[in-house]
Image (spheres, helix red, strand yellow):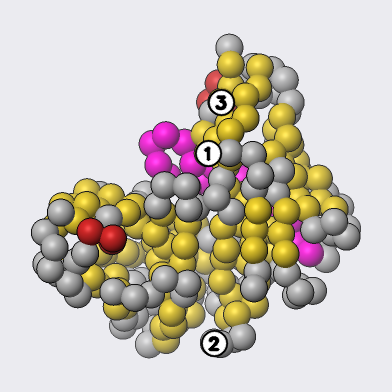
Amino acid sequence: AQKITQTQPGMFVQEKEAVTLDCTYDTSDQSYGLFWYKQPSSGEMIFLIYQGSYDEQNATEGRYSLNFQKARKSTNLVISASQLGDSAMYFCAMIFAYSGAGSYQLTFGKGTKLSVIP
Amino acid sequence: NAGVTQTPKFQVLKTGQSMTLQCAQDMNHEYMSWYRQDPGMGLRLIHYSVGAGITDQGEVPNGYNVSRSTTEDFPLRLLSAAPSQTSVYFCASSPLAGRSTDTQYFGPGTRLTVL
């Protein structure tokens, strides 16, 4: 079964510094997508960045970038120049083929709570 | 565009009551899904739909029913609420039938408490 693991329940980072949030996954599929979502204290789920299993380049979106290591089955999120507004829960998720209906399902890790210190 | 909308935002039920959580999207997305979020558990898939008239179960479907009569709407029904269904419920949608490249967009969530 597919599984997403986020080993850091909580992280602290000084404002303006970079931080890396870890995510590993387990799948036997060759085609899959990896996502990161941010959940601030207000509760909404905000899409941040996506990496496809066949993408050769690491994904980047503004201050967010992924360190995608396919052989190690890891996709770590790097946030550069942290801001106070980055304090939130961060979820790694993977979409994989679900053979029952020929469609795909999104599986989430348990999240990492990031706190940015002024 | 409103995106994905959910109603109500908050709900308190008594054990055994039934209710429907509403979800609607105005982006003409084929794929819609329901998740529940419990403390320390991340989000878990309850049911999903790849188009009008087509639904299937996710990881935690027991106690919930869904239907998809239109592309826009995907209601989640609790037939007989139990305290174990106290959670935050998120509806999400994506453009096509959940291809590996399609981002899922989430509604604001419904916080449900069952007493």
- Disc 2/disc 3 C-alpha distance (Å): 40 Å
Check the residue under mark 3 and report the chain it is in. A
Horizontal arrangement in the rendering, residue B73 relative to residue A53 (left or right): left
* SS category of the residue bearing label 1: strand
Q: Earlier in the sequence, mark 1 or mark 3?
A: 1
Residue B15 screen position, x and y as percent: 13, 63
Residue A10 lies, with reference to residue A67, above or below; the image says above
Residue B42 rendering spot, x and y as whole percentages: 50, 52
Chain label for disc 1: A
Residue for badge 2: A101
The residue closer to the viewer here, B26 or B40, is B40
The residue under label 2 is which amino acid type? Ala
Location of mark 1 (residue): A89
- Chain for disc number 2: A
Q: Quadrant of the C terminus of chain A?
A: top right
Q: Amino acid at mark 1?
A: Met
Q: Residue at x 26, y 64 (%)?
A: B22
Discs 2 and 3 carry the same chain letter: yes
Q: Which residues are magenta?
A: A38-53
Is B94 situated above or below A85? below
- SS assignment at label 3: strand
Name which residue lies at 48% across and 53% down. B41
Lower position in the chain sequence, tag 2 or tag 1: 1
**Residue at the spot of label 3:** A115
